[in-house]
Amino acid sequence: MQDLIDQLDAELRSGPAAAFDVAVTVRAGRRAVRRRRLAAGASGLAAAVLIGGFAAISGGSTEHASDVPVAGDPSASVSPEPWPDEDLHYEPLRSTDQGWQVNPRATILEQIEFTATDRHVYTAFRLRFEGDQLYAVGRDDGTWVADEIRARNRPPLRAWAEKQFKMAGDR
């Protein structure tokens, strides 16, 4: 029995000779790995350039942190009266005898006063309300105008508000 084991061991120890050049195959494999790593690096670089270019194009805000009032500015008027339940989820502003009041569920991100071409002083707001950012401004007749804004193409609040009054006067 031991002869059979020795015979099998001897046969398995000396395998057949390679039918190909091992050094050439290893070099080709290393070149393939190098090409794959180079392609991965180039695609990563291309993605970074694409993201950077998009950020440069779309991030053109000229506002600085020191120019924008802090969210929840205490100078903003918040309604001392209860807000009507039917308007709580739909109305970002309401007109009262004291002027315009912001819904208590809204966060004031920016608030400005400006004099329109009709020589009246108005207050305009940039708000976060129900998950959206809005520009809103109240008019003398008790109506208000609000637009959902996108960060990418947002004009300054003052320019937006003045445009609303110019448009209202043109009608």
Image: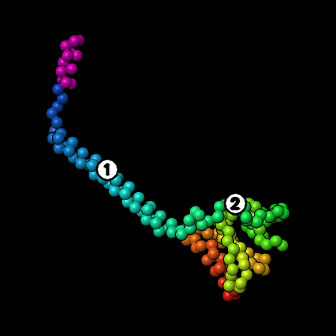
Side of 104 relative to 55 (left or right): right
Residue furthest toward the front? 66
Measuring from the top left, give residue 169's x and y in whole percent.
69, 86
Q: Residue at x 43, y 65 (%)?
A: 53
Amino acid type, mark 2: Gly
Rendered image: mark on residue 37: 1
Place residue 164 in its image quadrant: bottom right
| Rendered location of residue 79, percent (x, y) | 80, 64
Would you call the spot at circle 1 few (<14 residues within 10 Å), some (14-19), or many (20 or more)?
few
The residue shown at (73%, 81%) is: 120
* Residue 11 belongs to magenta span: yes
Question: Label 2 to label 1, Cα distance in Å?
Answer: 51 Å
Q: Which residues are magenta?
A: 1-13
Earlier residue among tags 2 and 1: 1
Where in the figure is residue 72, as x and y percent of width and height? Answer: 69, 60
Marks 2 & 1, CB-CB < 8 Å contact:
no
Is 60 located above or below residue 42 in the figure?
A: below
Classify mark 2: helix, strand or loop: loop
Residue 122 shown in magenta: no
Residue 72, numbered circle: 2
Q: In the current view of this chain or complex, which residue is farthest to the bottom?
A: 170
The C terminus, quarter of image: bottom right
